[in-house]
Image: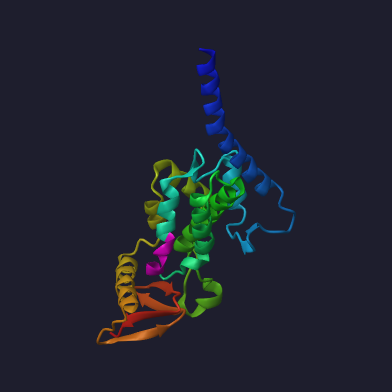
Amino acid sequence: MKSISFITFILFKTLTSGAGDLTESIRQFIDTKSVNSYYEINNEELLSGKALPLFYLNRIYAPAWFKHDTLDKNGYVLLNYIRNVGQQGLQPEDYHLYLIEKYIWQMLCSIPKNTTDMMRLDLLLTDAFMLLGSHLYYGKVDPEKEGSSWKIERKNTELRIDLKLEDALTRDDVSNELNMLAPKHRSYWMMKEELAFFLRLKLTGLTVKGALPVRSSAFLQSRGSYFKYDHAIIWYPVR
């Protein structure tokens, strides 16, 4: 009986010690940032600002994307969303795509798992969601600098992206939460579908009669709403 209890205790410690180590690793990363500096991982800056430490402080530094030292499905859903964000005129590499894929691969190949790598992956995914959500909600361009002649107005509502992320994780609905942050205009989603179609044509090397290449930072105007497709090259039909 004693041996069974001892084995149960060892198994419990094995399952829970990793989570504790990961939480402590996140806490140290968040709390040891010096004043007037910024968070970075592998020389890549984390850009979500004050929302990042606030999010983890409210979670008491518990990891957001791991369960029992295993990346949960929300992490893979976000990775897939980032890979396809070009369909919304954004650049996947702006959301830590390379580092996220790197640490996922290292995590899958490592036995035992490296706590530091898991901590970095958790933070990268969090920052990617926050940055991507902000870009979908506010837009990626500064309307005061690049949109003065377009009369683009800022949204007045302050976005609590940390709470949006918490809701998405609680409901296991990361993709839909990000979609809800995007513009609600029907014209936006029509252009998104059209852009996805022409990007697929570009990948296959095909062209369409009546289509022409558009250079980067091309603005598309539709029914009083303005969106920026920030691809190096996109295809858009001549009207």
Residue 36 placement (x, y as % from top left): 73, 58
Classify residue 35 by image quadrant: bottom right
Q: Residue at x 74, y 54 (%)?
A: 34
User: What residue span does the magenta drawing correspond to?
Assistant: 82-88
Q: Residue furthest right?
A: 35
Classify residue 86 by image quadrant: bottom left
Q: Residue at x 60, y 36 (%)?
A: 20
**Is 123 colored magenta in this rendering?**
no
With 145 as the anchor, is 211 left or right in this view?
left
Tell me, yes or no, if residue 138 can be seen here: yes
User: Which quarter of the rendering shows the C terminus?
Assistant: bottom left
Residue 24 placement (x, y as % from top left): 64, 40
**Which secondary structure is most common in the magenta stretch?**
helix
Residue 18 placement (x, y as % from top left): 57, 38
Residue 116 placement (x, y as % from top left): 61, 48
Q: Is residue 168 above or below residue 228?
A: above
Q: Residue furthest front?
A: 3
With 75 as the anchor, is 19 left or right in this view?
right
Q: Is residue 46 above or below residue 64?
A: below
Tell me, yes or no, if residue 61 can be seen here: no
Classify residue 82 by image quadrant: bottom left
Q: How is colour applied across the structure in the image? A: rainbow
Q: Residue at x 30, y 68 (%)?
A: 193
Q: Is residue 144 above or below residue 210?
A: above
